[in-house]
Image: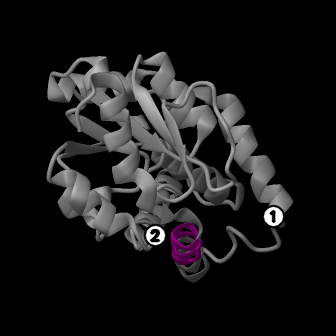
Amino acid sequence: MIQCITFDLDDTLWDVRPALQKAEQAQNAWLDEHYPAARAGLSEEAILALKKAVLAEQPALRHQISLFRKRFLARLLIDAGIPEAEASGAAEEAFSAFIARRNEVEVFPHSDAVLDTLGQHYILGALTNGNADVFKTPLGRHFRFSLQAEQVGAAKPEPALFDRARALTSLDPHQVLHVGDSHDHDVLGAHRAGISCIWLSTAGEESDFAAAVIGCLSELPDAVLALQAKRYGVP
């Protein structure tokens, strides 16, 4: 029987775009106030090229997005003529401005009620490739645990996050169900870990790997019950 349901966060329980926009604005406002030369005259293309250069030099940062942002900010400052030691400290400050707004999320209309319903019967956990902290959001009260890709050194669809969740709960793969909006990350990642996944696809797509596909989060409790009944013949 399913005993634990894990959730992706960004674009599954909330729209990530507004939070990222606010966080980027806070970060850039800090930079413009303290180091105005850092971004002066730089186009979006130039900033993107710099990010790609940092990743090319340090590929492991793909799974450590907070550290990647700090390294990028430090490089931005160094390229503007700021001494390396000062740039490193300033990057930490700019990142602090970013992360302070990162968790100011606008949750989807059904998220709170669905989590409240499921939390009465299942252990709920969060598995994210991002750097949101679910416990600093309005939904944090529903969750028993939360894991970020940068904590385990590998992002979905690698099975590390799913394996760590099982280790935390001491459950077998068939006792865990994952829910997420990304077929590449959530559905295929869960499949690789031997865990069933319900895919939130607002476009009504189909999947050979998802245990079920829902178009709205409000459908999730019924989908979980249907999956339990299909497997074991009981609700």
Instruction: Tell me where residue 147 appears, x and y as whole percent.
Output: 32, 40
Q: Quadrant of residue 128?
A: top left
How far is the residue under mark 2 from the one under mark 1?
A: 30 Å
Q: Amino acid at mark 2?
A: Phe
Q: Are marks 2 and 1 in contact (CB under 8 Å)?
A: no
**Mark nearer the viewer, 2 or 1:** 2
Residue 44 badge: 1
- Residue drawn at the location 31% of the way across and 68% of the way down: 112
How far from the left and from the top, in percent, is residue 7?
38, 45
- Asked if residue 196 lies left or right of residue 121, the reply is right
- Rendered residue at 33%/56% (across/down): 133
**Residue 191 appears at what percent x and percent y?**
49, 21
Residue toward you, 12 or 23: 12
Check disc 2: other Cα within 10 Å, few if <14, some if 14-19, many if 20+. some
Q: Which residues are magenta?
A: 18-26
| Amino acid at circle 1 | Glu
Residue depicted at 63% across the width and 25% down the height: 208
Q: Does the stretch in magenta take in 106? A: no
Where residue 141 sits in the image (x, y, percent)?
Answer: 18, 62
**Image quadrant where residue 40 sits:** bottom right
Q: Is residue 78 left or right of residue 92?
A: right
Q: Earlier in the sequence, mark 2 or mark 1?
A: 1
